[in-house]
Amino acid sequence: MNAKRIAVVTGGTTGLGAAITLALLEQGRTVVATYYPGDLNACEALPEWSVRMKEAGHDVFIFPVDVTDPASCEALIARVNTEVGVPLILVNNAGITRDAPLHKMTFAQWNAVIMTNLNSFFTMTRPVIEGMRAAKWGRIVSISSVNGEKGQFGQANYAAAKAGIIAATKSVAAENAKYGVTVNAVAPGYIATDMVMAIKEEVRTKIVEGVPVGRLGEPSEIGRVVQFLTSDDAGLITGSTIDANGGLYYR
């Protein structure tokens, strides 16, 4: 029964999301990986990624969704229910950055990040939560960030959204604990995704110097954290935020 469960991973075809998708596939899950059709980079990479998944023997469903649009999210879950089955695992991973110090930030930059990174917690969780409650089992994991816990220069929008995920996680966990539905967050530190590796080497060197373990995290390491939190063995963990940041202490 554990291996037959269906997982939805938003932003699940690139970067950290692709690593999470792979971790759940290796766990034996049926995975629906979503992408945003307006993201040209994600769309261009999609055919090659799909081929690699098939060559590795993974049967993954790839569906488009706009996580900022409630109707799009409801349509996605209706499609999953019809074509795949009832999803009992949700990983809220999709996210963007629009960095600028607040005195230079536009409302459009603020709103785009809040809509994508925070509002998506509602737009994606709302359509699946009743199915999980009915099944008396569910796992919701949302990707927050160390910057949602400590703040970051030029990222007031991003930090606010990621902090909001942590608070929402605690609330929804309390509402659904008696139904066997756990709700948790993962707060990564600096991870060696394509976005981070594109930073100038001298800047990355300074970043690594500030990480106590002395290296960037690997996307697969975050994938394994999500893998555990979505397992039967993690049934006692809910309302929690797991820090995976290499020792970046901020409290």
Image (cartoon, rainbow, N blue to C red):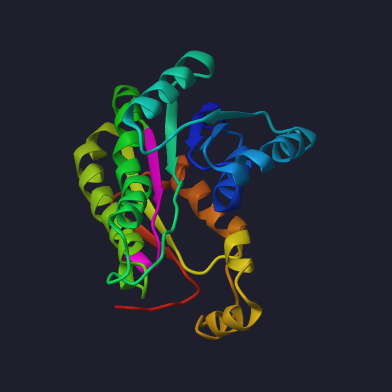
The magenta-colored residue range is 138-148
Which residue, as the protein is rendered here, is positioned at the far top? Answer: 82
* Residue 208 seen in this snapshot: yes
Q: Which of 131 and 27 is in front in this view?
A: 131
Which residue is drawn at the image coordinates 27% and 72% (left, top)?
103
Which residue is drawn at the image coordinates 32% and 35% (left, top)?
123
Residue 93 rendering spot, x and y as whole percentages = 46, 47
Residue 158 rendering spot, x and y as whole percentages = 35, 61
Classify 123 as above or below 194: above
Quarter of the C terminus within the rendering:
bottom left
Q: Which of 204 and 37 is in front in this view?
A: 37
Residue 22 rendering spot, x and y as whole percentages = 63, 44
Seen in the image, is 56 located left or right of residue 89?
Answer: right
Classify 85 as above or below 33: above
Residue 147 rendering spot, x and y as whole percentages = 37, 68
Classify 64 as above or below 105: above
